[in-house]
Amino acid sequence: MVPAASTGQNAFCDPCGSGWLTVTDANSNVVALDHGCGTADCSSCTPTACPPIACFNQTVPAEGVTRQWDETQWLGSTCGMSAMMCTEPVCVPPGKYKAKMCTTKNTAAPSSACVPGNTPVCTEVSFDLPGNTVVQGTVGG
């Protein structure tokens, strides 16, 4: 996700973590891109710990923010004798997908400090799998 050149420097706040990106399939179903902390992996039936995550508000740089994805989705299931909730990695099927990328305006712009606004600024980009492995969206343009 990159800011439009016309928005000026420091216009948006960097959304901490990977929550700024949502991928949906052709039926508008959300694709689970991550295993999710606290959820067991079906192969081991052992829950994972949720590490503490510090998030500091920073501006979105001109080169934008990125996220790697290996075209795996984490599907829900159960495991063990107690039928513990778990997720397992599965390759997404070929088809049409949408990437929705969101951030917030920096209410402190044009300074390098970042104070996120309340209203999301989003863009959507359609893509096909298999296909182009780089999907880029521009916000604020």
Image (cartoon, rainbow, N blue to C red):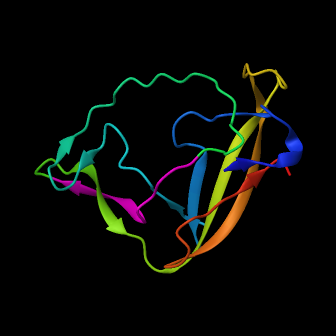
Is the residue 138 above or below the residue 50 in the image? below
**Quadrant assignment, res 120:** top right
Residue 71 lies in the magenta-colored region: yes
In the image, is 95 to the left or to the right of 39? right
In the image, is 124 to the left or to the right of 66? right
- The range drawn in magenta is 66-79
Residue 141 lies in the magenta-colored region: no
How many numbered dots are placed on residues in this image?
0
The residue lying at 72 percent from left, 22 percent from top is 114
The residue lying at 58 percent from left, 54 percent from top is 22
Q: Position of residue 11 (x, y in %)?
A: 80, 34
Q: Position of residue 90 (x, y in %)?
A: 33, 67
Of residues 132 and 72, the one nearer the viewer is 132
Of residues 102 and 76, the one nearer the viewer is 102
Of residues 79 and 58, the one nearer the viewer is 58
Q: Position of residue 27 (x, y in %)?
A: 59, 73
Q: Residue furthest left?
A: 81
Q: Residue furthest right?
A: 6
Q: Position of residue 26 (x, y in %)?
A: 59, 75
